[in-house]
Image: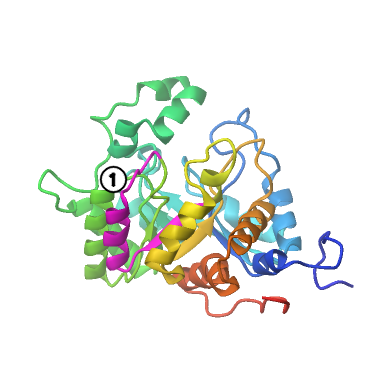
């Protein structure tokens, strides 16, 4: 039996196939995400089975709406052999900046705490996920900037309730991701997180319209030991918000030790996560990025951020 129980190209697995083995997608949306009629390409169990067959080590299941603890619990049993990590996103529907919500999610297995997405004031100001939500849910069309969540006060200090959420995340060793709060808020959160022993946060897709960080702000976050996220979504034809060449340029500036690759999509036209990760890995290799750097962004760094000490060894091949 082949070491890769998945269709391979003539001549066997490519270096990009090898890179998918052991990969962890730290930003993976499932179905249903917003509504049943907002379809994805596959049911969650089929998506996971494809990822497992490609050799992926795991995913972090994220939702813009509800904590994913229950779904992750059952999916781990439906599709054994691949890790499904749960998360909570601090949108108003899940309690906002609620330490109790974070604690409850953590006690039910949540490994990641995402700051607000469509609930963030910054997202609403920029017409990000909040605008997309309004196209699907009629009552979301009335989301206002004034009612949006801000991690900092008027003086730029991290709000007390946000500090409490960070304290809970630290207590339960949860990974913290900035999601759709502003770059300035993200920098303040990354600084404050250190007070609670959180060494590194993920600077979520700084290239996205929902965040729109400058290169200087990316450098400022990395200087605070943050890890910069690059989503395959942003490089797919529908969005094209960042090119692989520009992503490589930023990675070369901040180092591959401070970057991760995720998927972040929930559309019917989206390929399976493992295939999209393979496509981007192959693109980076073709453009000249070292195999070891891509491996760091897809496997080593995500595992480190989740506190995972052991992952399957990658298939050996030409690097």
Query: Residue at the right extreme?
Result: 1
Please state if 140 lies on the left or on the right of 11 as rendered.
Answer: left
Q: At x 65% / y 38%, what residue is drawn?
A: 40
Which residue lies at the image location 62% right of the left edge and 57% below the top edge? 283
Residue on which the image places disc 1: 182
User: Is residue 58 in sight in this rendering?
Assistant: yes
Q: Please determine whether, in this image, residue 316 is positioned above or below residue 128.
A: below
Number of numbered tags placed on the structure image: 1
- Residue 243, image x, y percentages: 51, 48
Which image quarter holds the C terminus?
Answer: bottom right
Q: Which residue appears farthest toward the left when viewing the image?
A: 155
Structural crowding at the residue carrying mark 1, measured as other residues with C-alpha within 10 Å and reported as few (<14), some (14–19) or many (≥20): many
Image x and y of residue 254, in percent? 38, 66
Pick whichever, 290 or 261, lies toward us: 290
Tell which of 150 and 292 is nearer to you.
292
Front-most of residues 103 and 163: 163
- SS type, badge 1: loop
Q: Position of residue 202 (x, y in %)?
A: 39, 60
Q: Is residue 108 visible?
A: no
Which stretch did the figure color magenta? 209-231
Does 192 appear above or below 204?
below
Quadrant where the N terminus sits is: bottom right
Check if residue 227 falls in the magenta segment: yes
Q: Position of residue 138 (x, y in %)?
A: 46, 19
The residue closer to the viewer here, 73 or 244, is 244
């Amino acid at each position: 039996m082949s070491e890769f129980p998945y269709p391979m190209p003539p001549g066997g697995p490519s270096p990009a196939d090898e890179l998918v083995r052991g990969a962890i997608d730290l930003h993976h949306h499932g179905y249903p995400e917003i509504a049943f009629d907002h379809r994805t390409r596959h049911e969650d169990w089929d998506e996971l089975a494809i990822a497992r067959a490609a050799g992926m080590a795991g995913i972090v299941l994220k939702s813009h709406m509800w904590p994913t603890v229950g779904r992750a619990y059952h999916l781990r049993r439906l599709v054994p052999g691949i890790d499904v990590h749960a998360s909570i996103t601090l949108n108003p529907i899940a309690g906002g900046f609620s330490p109790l919500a974070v604690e409850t999610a953590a006690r039910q297995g949540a490994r990641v705490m995402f700051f607000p997405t469509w609930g963030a004031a910054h997202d609403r100001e920029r017409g990000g996920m909040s605008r997309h939500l309004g196209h699907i849910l009629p009552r979301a069309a009335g989301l206002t900037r004034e009612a949006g969540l801000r991690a900092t006060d008027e003086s730029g200090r991290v709000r007390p309730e946000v500090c409490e959420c960070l304290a809970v995340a630290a207590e339960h060793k949860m990974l913290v991701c900035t999601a759709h709060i502003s770059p300035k808020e993200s920098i303040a959160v990354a600084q404050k997180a250190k007070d609670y022993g959180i060494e590194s946060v993920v600077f979520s897709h700084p290239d996205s319209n929902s965040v729109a960080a400058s290169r200087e702000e990316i450098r400022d976050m990395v200087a605070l030991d943050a890890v910069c996220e690059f989503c395959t979504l942003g490089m797919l034809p529908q969005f094209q918000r960042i090119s692989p060449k520009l992503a490589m340029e930023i990675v070369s500036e901040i180092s591959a030790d401070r970057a991760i690759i995720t998927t972040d999509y929930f559309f019917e036209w989206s390929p399976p996560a493992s295939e999209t990760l393979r496509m981007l890995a192959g693109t980076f290799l073709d453009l000249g990025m070292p195999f070891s750097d891509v491996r760091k962004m897809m496997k080593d760094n995500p595992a480190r951020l989740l506190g995972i000490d052991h992952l399957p060894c990658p298939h050996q091949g030409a690097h």
